[in-house]
Image (cartoon, rainbow, N blue to C red):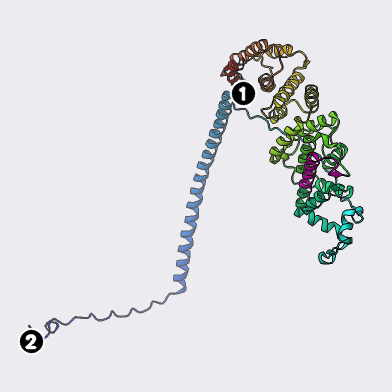
Amino acid sequence: MADACDPLDFEFEEPIQFSPPPPKKKKKLIGLDDLLNDIQKEQKRLDEKKIKQKKGRKIFDADDDDEDAEEALLSECVDKCEQEINRINGDEQMPFWGIQVFGDQEKLPQQEHPELKSSAFMQSFTKQKINPLLELNIEKGEDFLEGLLADGWLLHLVRTSGCVEKSIATWTFNLMLYSSKMWLMQAACDFWSAILSIRDKADTSSFKIDWLPRYSDLKRALQTYGFLFDSSPKSSSDIEMDSSDSITAGPPQNIRCWIKFVGFCCQLRDADIIVPTQEAEDLLVIIISLFLDRQLVGLAVILHESLHLVVNSFKDEEWPNCCEKVAESLASRLPCNINCLRVVESIAGVSGRSKQLRSAVALQFLATILKKKVSNAMKILRSLTAVNVKDKNCDLFQMYICLSLAENWIFFDTASKDKAVIHELWGTCLRNCSSGITITDLRSYASNVRSKASYLLQSSANMV
């Protein structure tokens, strides 16, 4: 161990030599001539830079113009190629279905019901000792009844009393079809559904409804909604699809309850609301027409339920004749284009009546297009088979519609007797379309017709 008195290591090191600070340079005085020279040099440098930039920009602009011209030419060639490919592939876009079922709606009537104040139902509350507790003001009795209706107490009370007064019936009916309040409209619809069911199940003497609506009341509501009864409907190509922004464009939200109520009434034909067969036929045509309004796509389930109830409301002996009349009415009222396929497809169901109606409607539309009489199905098929699809003037889009209609007519037909002959002619028609149109046919809808016919030809053997 080193002695504490020994010198430290750094004591033997040489002292660090520090160099003396450099002498301060004397500032050079800059004169005006020097400043002027510097400015001229800088200006000259900037001018040369601008000249070089202009020359470079001209070169780049020329290159850009050449590139733009090449891109435009290339884009044009690509577009032409895509068009040719689309024509060869037959990727024709089908037009949109949809017609203007509703025009401008009228202002929904806000009817007053002064008779509610003097009704026996309201008077029974004023005579009760609990009236002070309820703080029921007879002048505001309608507000009180709205609360009872929404909470379900109105239905309970009329069921207990065994009677629905005329004032209560008309008031709730108008709320259902004309109220702008969703909760009141729906509550009134539920109320009418319940009292009609009670009346149908109970003895007439045990439950009475002093007033029942008629078909004229339902038709008047549709007129208020703007339904186009008599005027020819406009196709989707002639109208704006987005008509929801218009304040007066029908229908209002009450159409939902109208559809439901029609189903209730037709389900209970004995309820003395929809009595004549003609009225039920008119309602069936209206319900099917509503499927063509794109504003009502969200109500498809309700429409199908109502359609099913209306179809089943006819008596067995009257249904065949009514089915033909409904088909004739639809074919004469609605356009024979893509919309008629929507009509046929909307008649869904597995019941015998649904199939019969779908087949009859398809046949009626097909006969209207071919200008033939429905009474002779053979002539209709022969006319369809005689169409020369190779002819350049042949309307292949109409041929596509005819094939789709004939498919629904034959597939859902349950009444024809000469099925063997019909299927033979149908097979001939399909073979003419599948073999008569080549894969290189560039006409519009040529590929659609050929593909449709080929598919149906393969499945037609199962239909025999």
Place of residue 175 in the rendered image (x, y in percent of width and height, measured from the top left): 82, 49
Q: Does residue 129 show up? A: yes
Residue 433 lies, with reference to residue 355, above or below; the image says: above
- Say which residue label 1 marks: 448
The Cα–Cα distance between marks 2 and 1, rounded to whole angstroms, is 111 Å
First of labels 2, 1 by sequence position: 2
Whether residue 289 sits left or right of residue 83 in the image: it is right
Q: Nearer the viewer, residue 312 or 182?
A: 312
Residue 58 lies, with reference to residue 330, above or below; the image says: below
Span shown in magenta: 188-209
The secondary structure type at the circle numbered 2 is loop
Mark 2: amino acid: Asp
The part of the image, by quadrant, that contains residue 125 is: bottom right
Mark 1: amino acid: Asn
Image quarter of the C terminus: top right
Residue at x 72% of width, y 29% of height: 343
Q: Nearer the viewer, residue 281 or 424?
A: 281
